[in-house]
Amino acid sequence: MACVLQIGAGGVGGVVAHKMAMNKEVFSRIVLASRNIAKCAAIADSIRAKGLGEIEIDSVDADNVDEIVALIEKYKPFLVVNVALPYQDLSIMQACLRTKTHYLDTANYEHPDSAHFEYKEQWAYDTRYKQAGIFALLGSGFDPGVTNVFCAYAQKHYFDEIHTIDILDCNAGDHGYAFATNFNPEINLREVSSKARFWTKDDKLALNQDLKKDAIYRKFEREEKHWEAEVAQKERERLARLVKADDKGGAAGLSMNFEGCQARGEGSYLEGNDQAECADSLKSRDKTTHYVGGQWRDVAPLALMKEWEYPEVGVKNSYLLYHEELESLIRNIKGLKRIRFFMTFGESYLTHMKCLENVGLLRVDEVEHNGQKIVPIQVLKTLLPDPASLAPRTKGQTHIGCYIKGVKDGKERTIYIYNICEHEACYKEVNAQGVSYTTGVPAMIGAKLICEGKWGVGASKNSSLGGHSAFSDKSLNLRSGLGHYPQGNSLYPSLDNNDFSSKILECQQGVDSKIQQSLTQDTRIAESSYTQERLALNADMPQGGEYQGIDNATELQNLARTNEYSQSGNAAGLSMNFDGCQARGEVSLVSLNDQAECDDSLKSRDKTTQGAGVWNMEQNDPDPFMQELNKQGLPYVVLEIDSNGESKVLEDGRK
């Protein structure tokens, strides 16, 4: 059915490639590329040995946009699956934009020079992806990924409003070593050693009265570390360089420009989860930052914990962390008052990590050693076991779920949705331990749904997001609320706001009359309300992300063409057939969206690019994804928990 290019051949990459090979009816041609061609060959050999057929392999530097573009043009895939490092998200997204190829990843972009990760640099691609008629799915791993879908599924089927979410990540496995990480050590240790963060809009819930202070990690805590002054000075110099570069560019405020990707505004680049927002704040401390009608509350790394009881696993010490899915779920879950993320750690892990931090081996800045520049955490990565090597040694389970409280039919309700995965079963199936498996399988499922047309271009979005039909099949265009686009019209500076709205109205006048007649006044009001609410919500978005979460790709494409022709003063040759605002001809939406992926991946699909853009997991219909979890080795369980703590099984995908 489809040719898919996978970039990344680590532990997760091995799982993705194996699982795609098990679904050859969808993934008819699989190309695996990495900087390390030997790792690709080893995965290909394993797939062949298991009787799953052949895959193709190639090499690529995922930091080099031109190399990625050349690779895409060589194989012409329908979709690029990015399971490389989070540092490489933007380079791969840029290459997909240049080649008009659909995109998927498992983790949001992380800045290589600071412990800072957020979605905004990727959300900034939304308008350009919509104009190109291509789809980007962000965070299709387990957390983020499946946890986002669990929340969307709960919102759609079990709640009218969700008030609190606690995402719980428990690895109850044992690899037999004193200290090792279950995925890339550099990513893992940066994530865990960053300050903790949760979001709330309720002062009482902000007290976290159900949590207690850690007594393990801080056993070896001291007021001062010998390396802090040096790092603080480097941070001051880095910020000064950014300000100087920005002043030269003539832009107001700090900005980050990645081949046209402008990330501006509160919460971008220097804020978010940066370990050192300013040179004097290297020591993590309590802090409050406003975000989407509530507040981020920052606390020191691993400072707060709770003894959670995990069904079928038992009680585990679980530590409050920051995790990237919080950033998008806050924007998409109705009625939310607080959201937190917890991960389990044992005493041995915490003690080792604190010692490594104290001596400076978790530093992400360059230091000089024997006349050479090294990054301490990268040296540590080299010294630690390769996570892939843990697979045959690891025994036990993973347990990841979402503990959700809210209201249904006026009554309070508690739902817990979770998955349990056996490390040994994972190794038997795909030569990987459970942590890699639980990330790789959802990546394959996301890719499968995109290739099948159930998610992505032409597919309707999650109807529960707005609580109305703004995302339904019958109402894929904006139609209402057209005068509420951002002031200043940064996308089309040659048009003032009145002209901007009139151009949309001209496009809408040609919408098929039968569809138009089927829309009730209530539907149009609901759509207008949703559009206005979303645009207000997106006021903090970077340039290019103003319409994220609004399904308006066709309108943006036609506006771009109309603006282009109005600037040239020559409309001749522009053949527009307004059937749902679709343009045909040499620059038609069909030619934009119908790429010559490969001979065996061409398929019949709707001649529309509505549904294009950059989307998070929970913004898509959760039902087909949940069904695939049960089919592909990650069955889920839904429990209802009463006020006495007694639970009742509502769904069990294992049966």
Image: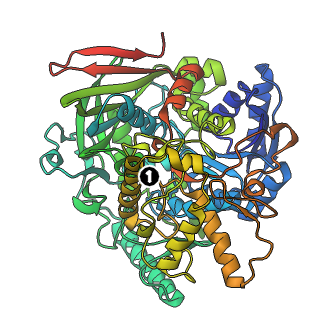
Residue 130 or residue 521, whichever sits in front: 521
**Residue to which mark 1 is pinned:** 190
The residue at the point 67 percent across, 60 percent down is 132
Vertical relation: 611 (above or below) 121: above
Vertical relation: 302 (above or below) 631: below
**Quadrant in which the N terminus appears:** top right
- Say whether residue 646 is left or right of residue 417: left
The reply to whether residue 458 is visible in this rendering is yes
Seen from this angle, which residue lies furthest right? 599
- For the image, the number of numbered tags is 1
- Say whether residue 481 is left or right of residue 572: left
The x and y percentages for residue 456 are 61, 44
Residue 451, picture quadrant: top right
Residue 404 or residue 398, whichever sits in front: 404
Q: Amino acid at mark 1?
A: Arg
The residue at the point 36 percent across, 55 percent down is 529
Q: Secondary structure at mark 1?
A: helix
The x and y percentages for residue 426 are 58, 22
- Say whether residue 31 is left or right of residue 172: right
Residue 288, picture quadrant: bottom left
Vertical relation: 513 (above or below) 245: above
Vertical relation: 418 (above or below) 3: above
